[in-house]
């Protein structure tokens, strides 16, 4: 599965969604106009309502007798019949008013809900009433869930998502939500934790990571925001009927107005439910086929079809199935791993997921249609280990770039690896997690210690610079933070350099627990520590480009992808390729060769040659990457392919080169798994 093709597919689906939404809004606009005209006809007495026939210009029903007696001295008035002006059914002025009002209500409601979801997956999880799983949890089921999610995040090279549990839900279900991997959240039900074993849980989480990597969850959030506006029409109609239920039933003055509102309210309610029908159809049309792809990706991710097949079979055999009872379950039904709500009518038409037995047969052709009996897993039977670590070590793999290593792949395969981690990557992540010192694992359990851990990783080896950095921490954050930083710096002593970036990503969930003000102070301290020696190392650049940027996700919107060709960004590509060539090659000839290999992939004109060393700072690279983020996925694929050919021009890759290439990929929102090579 090609990551960039899936990103383009998600972009096309966005256009399809907007088209369907526009059609639905136009239909609702006509419907509201029809309801308004029907109400006006009733108010003018054109239709009998509830046994009454109203006369235009008066609210007097037949049989009404006035108690007013004219004065004998008053002059007699001629009786002049009052006739209503013809109304008709087509009034452009009324149509424009109704359509504008409908568009305004739907637009404001959709924008309001979309703004409420700006924080990404966390906002969706909290809307559903989910509880966050703290990084330092000791509950065995939650600890197992964290291990599985962390393994897959490290394998896929994405930030570790926030993890939530729906404590009140006994069904087996889960979902991923967010705009980008940086603000993603994974939510599972209590039934999932209590009834799935580790490999089944891996299958479900692998399915959700496919949605994260392929852009599906961004589409789901957009669906929720847009369709909420359509649902508001039904809410308004019900509100009109509720108001009328407190009216006076058409007696006395205002009876005609009451009947008009009654008819209009009933019709708007009916139209609103037609809109709800359309909204469910749109969700089903956009969502259903993605589930087959996510199931296949889960099998590829875990090398185990039995995991996701077993989870699906348990859903079929479980008394609660995959049902979710939360109040907003219907609104978020397209997010879930399996059908969260059931419809008594049109169930096949509204289903956001394919039939359960079809999904099982696609990953397990031997399925005979029999669903197993599901029992609660005892707490002492819950596996809580890094299951792939032994297999990875037995296979003799190691991360490429420890010193200098010859990788067993060609540069053209790098872009195929983006967004497609294989089981070796998952096993590598499991082995890395198992090797981490206990002090580092414990530090990731709280925002205080996690921030101190990042500060400790940024301390310089130069004693004078290190003293200035620690003074910055003490002055800005206090003596307690200084002591924690020193403690974790000692724990980091002797650890391998390849652990540094993964540890930083593992610390993200704890860092996200900080308030915006605390996050701002954290980012400021990180910046001060990086600039303490007046130069930026590759690791410091990686921290500033990944950790701080991902931490701001949900508060700072990512740039829109508007650049569709390479032409407008060729100068930025030149800067990026030059920096990679200068970083990876010690001599001018090697740098020229590496740059030429990358530039040839982009067919860059000869006038755009290798930049000098003074123009190849990491700061210049960062600025170029910011602008390159505005390109569409297909252009990003070309850029990353050129970078890979430049870095791998000599068929060797150092740890610094590998990490820099992965930082570049991350900055372009292209998750590139670790390079692995058989250990010597």
Image (cartoon, grey):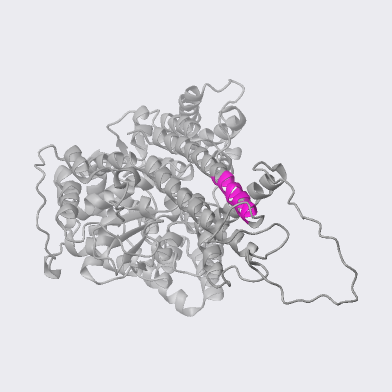
Q: Which quarter of the rendered picture does the N terminus lie within?
A: top left
Point out residue 337 in the picture as x, y percentages from the top left corner.
29, 51
Q: Is residue 541 visible?
A: no
Residue drawn at x 11%, y 51% is: 371
Farthest residue, direction front: 72
Total marks in image: 0
Determine the residue positioned at 11% across, 44% down: 369
Q: Is residue 53 above or below residue 209?
A: below
Judge left or right: residue 253 versus residue 326: right
Q: Position of residue 231 (x, y in %)?
A: 49, 55
Let me know if residue 394 appears in the view: yes
In the displayed structure image, the side of residue 8 where residue 445 appears, left or right: left
Point out the residue furthest to the bottom here.
Answer: 479
Residue at point 64%, 43% (across, down) = 89
Relative to 443, residue 334 above or below: above
**Quarter that holds the C terminus:** top left
Q: Nearer the viewer, residue 214 or 507?
A: 214
Residue segment shown in magenta: 28-42
Give whichever of 366, 456 is nearer the camera.
366
Q: Which of 392/583 is in front?
A: 392
Q: Quadrant of residue 365?
A: top left
Name the chief secondary structure element in magenta. helix
Residue 85, horizontal then vertical, whole percent: 74, 48
In the rendering, at what x and y percent does residue 593 appear?
46, 25
Residue 455 versus residue 586: which sits nearer the camera? 455
């Amino acid at each position: 599965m090609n990551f960039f093709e899936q990103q383009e597919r998600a972009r096309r689906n966005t256009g399809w969604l907007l088209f369907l939404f526009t059609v639905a809004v136009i239909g609702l606009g006509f419907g509201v106009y029809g309801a308004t005209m029907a109400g006006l006809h009733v108010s003018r007495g054109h239709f009998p309502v509830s046994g009454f026939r109203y006369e235009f210009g008066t609210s007097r029903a037949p049989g009404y007798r006035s108690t007013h007696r004219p004065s004998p001295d008053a002059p007699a008035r001629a009786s002049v019949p009052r006739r209503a002006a013809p109304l008709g059914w087509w009034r452009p002025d009324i149509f424009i008013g109704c359509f504008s009002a409908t568009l305004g209500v739907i637009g404001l409601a959709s924008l309001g809900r979309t703004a409420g979801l700006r924080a990404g997956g966390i906002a969706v999880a909290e809307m559903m009433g989910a509880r966050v799983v703290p990084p330092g949890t000791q509950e065995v089921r939650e600890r197992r869930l964290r291990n599985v999610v962390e393994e897959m995040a490290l394998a896929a090279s994405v930030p570790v998502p926030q993890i939530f549990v729906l404590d009140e839900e006994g069904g087996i279900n889960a979902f991923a939500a967010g705009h980008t991997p940086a603000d993603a959240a994974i939510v599972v039900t209590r039934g999932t934790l209590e009834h799935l074993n580790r490999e089944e849980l891996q299958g479900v989480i692998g399915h959700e990571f496919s949605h994260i990597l392929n852009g599906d969850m961004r589409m789901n959030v957009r669906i929720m925001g847009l369709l909420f506006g359509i649902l508001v029409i039904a809410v308004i109609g019900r509100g009109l009927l509720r108001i009328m239920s407190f009216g006076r039933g058409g007696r006395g003055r205002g009876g005609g107005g009451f009947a008009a509102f009654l008819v209009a309210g009933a019709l708007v309610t009916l139209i609103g439910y037609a809109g709800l029908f359309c909204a469910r159809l749109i969700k089903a049309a956009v969502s259903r086929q993605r589930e087959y792809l996510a199931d296949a990706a889960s099998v590829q991710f875990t090398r185990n079809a039995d995991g996701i097949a077993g989870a699906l079979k348990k859903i079929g055999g479980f008394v609660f199935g995959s049902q979710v009872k939360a109040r907003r379950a219907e609104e978020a039904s397209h997010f879930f791993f399996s059908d969260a709500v059931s419809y008594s009518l049109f169930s096949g038409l509204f289903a956001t997921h394919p039939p359960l037995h079809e999904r099982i047969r696609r990953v397990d052709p031997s399925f005979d249609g029999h669903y197993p009996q599901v029992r609660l897993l005892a707490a002492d039977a819950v596996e809580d280990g890094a299951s792939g670590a032994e297999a990875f070590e037995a296979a003799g793999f190691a991360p490429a770039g420890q010193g200098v290593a010859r990788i067993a792949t060609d540069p053209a395969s790098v872009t195929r690896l983006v967004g497609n981690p294989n089981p070796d990557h998952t096993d590598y992540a499991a082995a890395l997690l198992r090797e981490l010192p206990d002090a580092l694992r414990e530090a990731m359990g709280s925002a205080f210690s996690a921030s101190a851990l990042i500060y400790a990783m940024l301390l310089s080896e130069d004693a004078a610079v290190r003293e200035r950095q620690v003074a910055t921490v003490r002055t800005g954050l206090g003596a307690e933070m200084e002591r924690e930083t020193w403690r974790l710096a000692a724990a980091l002593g002797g650890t391998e350099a390849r652990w540094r970036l993964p540890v930083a990503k593992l610390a993200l969930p704890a860092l996200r627990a900080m308030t915006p003000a605390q996050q701002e102070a954290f980012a400021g301290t990180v910046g001060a520590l990086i600039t303490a020696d007046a130069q930026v190392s590759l690791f410091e650049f990686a921290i500033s480009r990944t950790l701080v940027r991902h931490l701001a996700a949900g508060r700072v919107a990512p740039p829109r992808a508007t650049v569709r060709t390479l032409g407008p960004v060729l100068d930025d590509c030149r800067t990026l390729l030059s920096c990679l060539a200068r970083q990876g090659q010690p001599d001018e000839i090697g740098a020229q060769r590496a740059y030429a290999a990358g530039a040839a992939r982009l067919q860059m004109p000869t006038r755009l040659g290798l930049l000098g060393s003074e123009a190849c700072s990491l700061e210049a690279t960062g600025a170029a990457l910011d602008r390159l983020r505005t390109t569409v996925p297909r252009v990003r694929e070309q850029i990353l392919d050129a970078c890979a050919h430049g870095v791998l021009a000599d068929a060797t890759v150092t740890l610094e080169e590998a990490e820099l290439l992965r930082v570049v990929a991350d900055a372009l929102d292209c998750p590139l798994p670790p390079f692995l090579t058989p250990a010597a």
